[in-house]
Image (tube, rainbow, N blue to C red):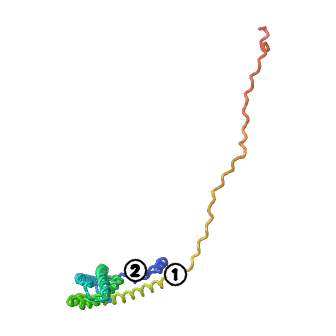
Amino acid sequence: MRTINHPRLCGLACRHVLTLWITLGIVTPAVSVAQGIAEPWDVTIAAQKMALQAARLEPLLDQVTPLDWQAGPATGTYIRQLQSTRDEVRYLVGAAQTLGKQPEKLSVAFETYFRLQSVENQVESLADGVRRYQNPAVGDLMISVMAANGSNRDQLRQYISDLSQTREQEFKIADSEAQRCRGMLLRQPAVAAPAARPTAKSPAAAPAPLTAPLTAPPTVPAAAPSVVPGANQPKGSR
């Protein structure tokens, strides 16, 4: 597994690496072969067979008629059990189909296995009532169809065991890497925040003058000299 030495990347790994490994749950082919885990294609085929085999129970359940049984107070119990068995068969078919599409998801594998166990218990109990109150041949056929999923169940159980061990190893590696990154961050010297620089102030605008600037008084044109009659006439003209 490649280590991370960049402090920022290590910080991200400390917060997210465990969540990513658990959520994604991806096993690479190299790890699968090394640990002896069944190939995803094999699990897909087994899941498809399981879904088809479980679906064969539905027409048999349609033949079960607990309303006609002379079972006394137990009749109501068998009616509810029949409906519960039908629901569990549908849940098993849906879980097996999902596992066929996502064989690498451990949670889906667990759900399929638990659904299969629930159907087995329900069918076995209901088949006892069918043998006793309706038709022994129908009850035996229900058990036979359910037992045909035995090999698929064993393969799924082994797959879950191997996949769980691999997930545990992956979790340990991821946890170790997260602890290493966290220790690296703690050893990093604290970086002081840069001092705030004073912002440059814009020069203040000059205050407006209180009074308008003084201006020169307007020039008044000199008056023309007055002419006195006879003052400037030559003597000979008189």
Q: Is residue 49 left or right of residue 1?
A: left
| Residue 41 visible in the snapshot | no
In the drawing, does residue 90 fall left or right of residue 8? left
Quarter occupied by residue 60: bottom left
Q: Quadrant of the N terminus?
A: bottom left
- Which element type, helix, strand or loop, lies under badge 2? helix
**Considering depth in this image, is 108 or 51 the residue closer to the camera?**
51
- Please give left or right for residue 80 compared with residue 212 in the image: left
Q: Nearer the viewer, residue 57 or 8?
A: 57
Where, by quadrant of the figure, is residue 236 drawn? Answer: top right
Figure quadrant of residue 155: bottom left
Residue at x-position 36% and y-position 88%: 164
Q: Work out whether residue 226 can be spotted.
A: yes
Tag 2 and tag 1, C-beta contact below 8 Å: no
What x and y, as percent, mark residue 134?
Answer: 23, 88
Badge 1 marks a residue whose secondary structure is: helix
Q: Which mark is residue 23?
A: 2
x and y percent of residue 130 in the render? 24, 89
Q: Quadrant of the C terminus?
A: top right
Using the numbered discs, state the Cα–Cα distance from disc 2 to disc 1 in whole angstroms.
Answer: 25 Å
Task: Classify mark 2: residues with Cα within 10 Å, few (<14), some (14-19) or many (20+).
Answer: few
Amino acid type, callout 1: Leu
User: Which mark, residue 185?
Assistant: 1
Residue 233 is situated, as x and y percent measured from the top left of the image, at 77, 12
- Three-letter amino acid code of the residue under disc 2: Thr
Q: Which of the two discs, 2 and 1, sits closer to the camera?
A: 2
Q: Residue furthest left?
A: 137
Q: Residues within 10 Å of mark 1 (few under 14, many from 20)?
A: some
Of callouts 2 and 1, the N-terminal one: 2
